[in-house]
Image (cartoon, rainbow, N blue to C red):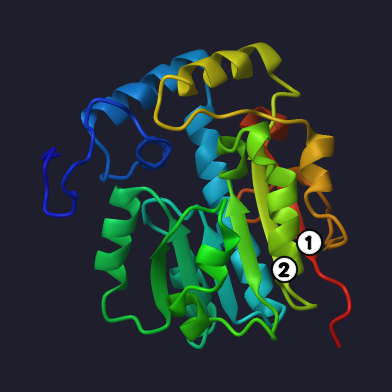
Amino acid sequence: MTELSSWVPEGIDLTKPSAARAYDAFLGGSHNFAVDRQFARRAEEVFPGVAKACQANRSFLRRTVQFMVDAGVRQFIDIGSGIPTVGNVHEVAQRRNPDCRVVYVDNERVAVAHSELILAGNDRATIVEADMREPASILDDRRTRRLIDFDQPVGLLMLAVLHFLPDADDPAGLVERYRAALAPGSHLVISHATAESRPEEMRALEALYSTSANPAVARSTSWISGLFGEFRLVEPGAVFVPEWRPDGAGVVAHPEHHIFFGGVGVKPGYG
């Protein structure tokens, strides 16, 4: 891959890996740099199967979006959307129902730049460059307000992003603020890294991420489950992502080895 391509914004630091670009590498994407691919290889050494875990998380995204569209949701916000690759939210949702509208949110410049390229000409999807720690900068943005009616149910996705917020940023309190902004009938989708089944390997992976632009912290499954607050978890509840309504090949052996834990919750009171 050419390291400096037309989609690369000026001023990108090519000496330090980023979580978004490393995730792209885990998924087999092409919008990453040598430093990110080296990081991904090292991550696979300290936590064998991390790439498969990321791929399972991507499959979880697809299944949850399909579920939400089938449940009647027509508008989505994907926070920490990352670098677009096959199976983006708008592709999955609009294939199910062309009327679906999608707002992507990220603060990684490569993710934003490439999103702008692939969304050009799609008037039902956009990208907002913003920091998830500042909900108003997302919820009140003119691009968000053009596509999202907050008086109607919204599908809010926060996949593999909250573990990049340290405890000092109060991620649980932040999620509560987002939940409060959503109308009854809205769906919240979360996945988050946990160390419960492979603690030593996860500590090594956390140490590796501490050398990147995006340090990460794994948290307990009970803490992750608590992020849904008053939202009612749909079956099968909060689980390791391969366990959430699997399709295709069916249930994955040892789903707890796939790192990511989460589920889908629905805000009560609709209808």
Q: Quadrant of the N terminus?
A: top left
Residue at 87%, 73% (x, y): give it: 268
Name the residue nearer the viewer: 108 or 192: 108
The answer to whether one can see residue 9 in this image is yes
Name the residue nearer the viewer: 115 or 96: 115
To which quarter of the image does residue 53 belong?
top right
Q: Identify the disc placed on residue 164.
A: none
| Label 1 Cα neighbours within 10 Å, binned few <14 / some 14-19 / many ≥20 | many
Q: Callout 2, which amino acid?
A: His
Sequence-earlier tag: 2 or 1: 2
Location of residue 185 with respect to 201 vertically, above or below: below
Find out whether the residues at labels 2 and 1 contact each other: C-beta distance under 8 Å.
yes
Name the residue nearer the viewer: 84 or 97: 84
The answer to whether one can see residue 60 in this image is no
- Whole-angstrom CA distance, mark 2 to mark 1, is 6 Å
| Label 2 Cα neighbours within 10 Å, binned few <14 / some 14-19 / many ≥20 | many
Q: Is 5 placed left or right of 252 in the picture?
A: left
To which quarter of the image does residue 161 belong?
top right
Q: Identify the disc placed on residue 265.
A: 1
Where does label 2 land, which residue? 187
Q: Is 135 placed left or right of 226 in the picture?
A: left
Q: Is 234 placed left or right of 264 in the picture?
A: right
Where's residue 15, x and y in %?
24, 25
Residue at 79%, 35% (x, y): give it: 221
Residue at 70%, 80% (x, y): give it: 153
Secondary structure found at label 1: strand
Where's residue 55, x and y in %?
50, 43
Where's residue 2, x and y in %?
10, 40
Name the residue nearer the viewer: 54 or 136: 136
